[in-house]
Image (cartoon, rainbow, N blue to C red):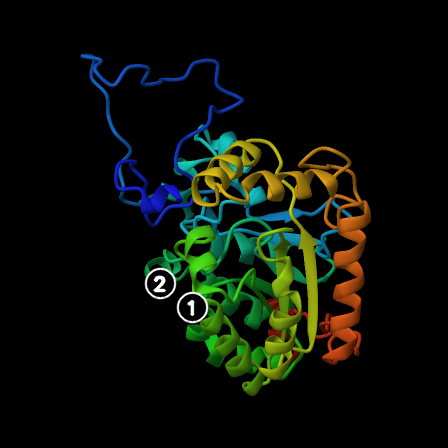
Amino acid sequence: MSVQENENIQYLKGRGAQFNPKNRFLKNERVKEHIEGIDEWLEPDPKTQFLEETAKGLVNKVESPDVGMWYSMNPYQGCEHGCTYCYARNVHEYWGYSAGLDFEQKIIVKKNAPQLLRKFLMNSKWECVPLSLSGNTDCYQPGEKKFRITRQLLEVCAEFNQPVGIITKNAGVLRDKDLLSKMAKKNLVSVILSVTSLDEELRRTMEPRTTTGQQRMRTIRELTEAGVQTGVMLGPMIPGLNDHEMSNILKTAAENGASFAGYTFVRLNGAVKLIFHDWLYKNFPGRADKVWHFIEAGHNGKVNDSRFGTRMTGEGNLAKLIAQQFDRYTEKYGLNNEKMGLDCSLFSRPSQQIKMF
């Protein structure tokens, strides 16, 4: 019996993490050691808090050679989607919060992000290469419906003819289909839908506040029909949980118009190890040991590997098998047949456009 089925155990439905692990940068922490304690104790607030801030910077150079992007920009820090495996959780510790519930409940909103992007692109030292939305947290998480920062960033990119790649697991990207379609005509945009499972029960447990797998497939179809080059990212593949779905996900994505695909092997870095372990054993007690050992087998006895070249794909026989299956199925379903790329030659600053006339 999983913890969600046990009425005697409190489980925060709608959230991935079930607790706040200690922030490694903070010396002190507040814990509740005894349930009968008489000291004041504030229970976790189930509501999402949006913390608006005036950021100093937006565009970051990506030093990692194995993530497929040059520069990234993240309008939000923290993510309400609640994916239990998310590597970005650890970044929340730099803001003084926990990688656990805080990551899902305290969302930092960079309200001046569009102005920062415009200033960045106006810098004469900028030599155009594609930007990525987002390299960290999802730019179309639920808060985007209210703040519309991602929409504004795309409008700035369109004005400069700045190519941009988007990765999301939210069908909310369809709101901007009109703008994406216009940019696509100039080959300025591509969209990747991240899909971990088409099993709705697993998706709801592992990614509690995300769009359903079928909705993501519909999103691929509608964007493709709008002329946007669209792909699918199977991230992450978790042996014993969703790796058996690889063929079905790739097949369904191809049938809905996806032209390219990628995947990652699960890695549990920093506090994510504690969060995922807690989640796994609470929700899948019957196979948790097996899944955990599979993950270890893919990282030379550990659950995380920070080495470039192996951290995203894993190593060992199990990881090799998943890689072979990915190659086989992408070929079978006609994915990755063409080299994808965005056009950087059209980039121009508004002042340059005025001088032309």
Amino acid type indicated by mark 1: Gly
SS label for mark 2: helix
- Residue 278, given in percent of the width and then of the height, sits at 47, 35
Q: Nearer the viewer, residue 231 or 158?
A: 231
Asked whether residue 122 is in view, the answer is: no
Can you identify the residue that label 1 sits on? Answer: 172
Asked whether the residues under the numbered discs 1 and 2 touch, taking CB atoms below 8 Å apart as contact, a structural biologist would say yes
Query: In which quadrant of the rendered view does residue 54 lie?
Result: top left
Amino acid type indicated by mark 2: Lys
Q: Is residue 353 left or right of residue 39?
A: right
Residue 145 shows which numbered tag? 2
Query: In which quadrant of the rendered view does residue 246 lie?
Result: bottom right
Q: Which of the two discs, 1 and 2, sits closer to the camera?
A: 1
Q: Is residue 126 left or right of residue 90?
A: right
Report the residue at 22% width, 13% height from top. Answer: 37
Quadrant containing the C terminus is bottom right
